[in-house]
Image: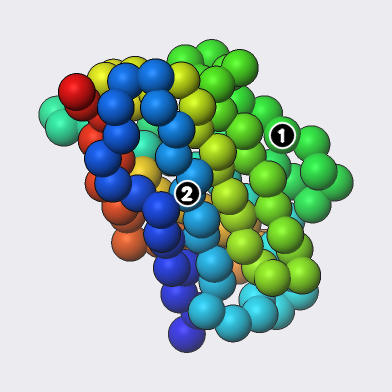
Amino acid sequence: QVQLVESGGGLAQPGGSLRLSCAASRSIFGGIFAMAWYRQAPGKQREFIAKITNSGSPNYADSVKGRFAISRDSAKNTAYLQMNSLKPEDTAVYYCNFVPNSGTADYWGQGMQVTVSS
């Protein structure tokens, strides 16, 4: 059973930075097509933040464009999310998501809290 292990969350001040990581516990058969990040704030639905495919092309939600950067290390089955210029409205539980090349079900991380507050 593959698990996605997230790290790097916590408390940051407005204007500060955090770097999130998400690593698969073992290799995923056939490789990973896309790695993505989502978040869910209290009382709101889970929303897409960023995605990077195995071609290296990233795309972002408008709310984080220019502030967040997604990257991946396919050899390590790891995704990263560099979050800069953090705002209080970035406070949420952040989830990573891996989409396998094989077309089987996606993998999800357990979620980790990011709180932006002074």
Mark 2 or mark 1: which comes first in sequence?
2
Measured Cα–Cα span from mark 2 to mark 1: 16 Å
Locate residue 25, reporting x and y percent: 52, 79
Instruction: Name the residue carrying label 2.
Output: 20
Q: Is residue 32 visible?
A: yes
Residue that extends furthest to the left in the rendered view of this protein:
43
Badge 2, how many Cα within 10 Å: few under 14, some, many 20+? many
Badge 1, how many Cα within 10 Å: few under 14, some, many 20+? some
**Quick check: 54 left or right of 40?**
right
Locate residue 36, reporting x and y percent: 56, 45
Quarter of the rendering containing residue 38: top left
Q: Count all numbered tags in the image, as a single digit.
A: 2
Circle 1 SS class:
strand
Instruction: Name the residue carrying label 1.
Output: 58
Q: Identify the residue shown where x is 72% and y is 59%.
A: 73
Q: In the image, is residue 36 above or below residue 49?
A: below
**Most foreground residue, 25 or 16:** 16
Circle 2 SS class:
strand
